[in-house]
Image (spheres, grey):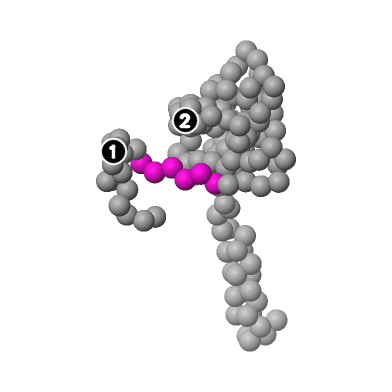
């Protein structure tokens, strides 16, 4: 190796190793609330919660096993679920110590999903005066 190729080789090595050291994206966990004849059935990352465990403990177990604090949970909810079910589900997610979540509603054929966006809670207004700003 001569004096010209050494700096070039060092620069290439530096670029390669720095690209390997870039932080990876946080892992997403997936919670599916699917509709059955008996109501909603839940799975977390493809696994149903154990009968003796319940959904909150299952969510907490998955969260505590994940060392990355940036992890978020993706919630896929069947269109037949009620808003009250979804509100309770979000409450469990927050109790399980997930800092962020995204909610998608899927149709019965599992062909399409729509994302639901939640704002911060606001006081109830019968005349809608709080909603003067467009999104």
SS at mark 1 in the image: loop
Q: Residue sitting at 57 percent across and 22 percent down?
A: 55
Label 2 or label 1, whichever comes before in sequence order: 2
Q: Is residue 62 left or right of residue 100?
A: right
Q: Residue sitting at 62 percent across and 35 percent down?
A: 78
Q: Is residue 20 left or right of residue 125?
A: right
Front of the two marks 2 and 1? 1
Compare residues 29 and 103 and report the one nearer the observer: 103
Q: CA distance from mark 2 to mark 1?
A: 20 Å
Residue 13 picture location, percent across and down? 63, 70
Q: Is the residue marked by circle 1 packed among few (<14), some (14-19), or many (20+) residues within 10 Å?
A: few
Asked if the magenta segment contains residue 34, the reply would be: no
Specify the quadrant that holds the C terminus: bottom left
Residue 7 picture location, percent across and down? 60, 80
Q: Which residues are magenta?
A: 115-120
Q: Is residue 47 left or right of residue 27?
A: right
Residue 18 picture location, percent across and down? 57, 64
Q: Is residue 43 visible?
A: no
**In the rendered structure, are the residues bearing label 2 and label 1 in contact, judged by CB atoms less than 8 Å apart?**
no
Specify the quadrant that holds the N terminus: bottom right
Q: Is residue 114 visible?
A: yes
Question: Which residue is under mark 2?
Answer: 87
Question: Which residue is under mark 1?
Answer: 125
Q: Residue sitting at 66 percent across and 28 percent down?
A: 35
Asked if the magenta segment contains residue 118, the reply would be: yes
SS at mark 2 in the image: helix
């Amino acid at each position: 190796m001569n004096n010209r190729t050494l700096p070039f080789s060092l620069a290439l090595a530096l670029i390669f190793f720095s690209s390997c050291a870039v932080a990876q994206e946080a892992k997403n966990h997936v919670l599916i609330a699917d509709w059955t004849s008996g109501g909603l059935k839940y799975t977390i990352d493809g696994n149903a919660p154990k009968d003796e465990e319940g959904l909150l403990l299952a969510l907490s177990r998955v969260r505590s096993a994940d060392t990355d604090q940036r992890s978020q949970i993706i919630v896929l909810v069947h269109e037949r679920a009620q808003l009250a079910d979804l509100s309770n589900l979000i409450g469990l997610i927050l109790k399980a110590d997930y800092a962020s979540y995204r909610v998608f509603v899927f149709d019965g054929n599992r062909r399409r999903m729509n994302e639901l966006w939640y704002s911060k809670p606001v006081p109830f207004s019968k005349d809608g005066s709080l909603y003067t700003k467009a999104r």
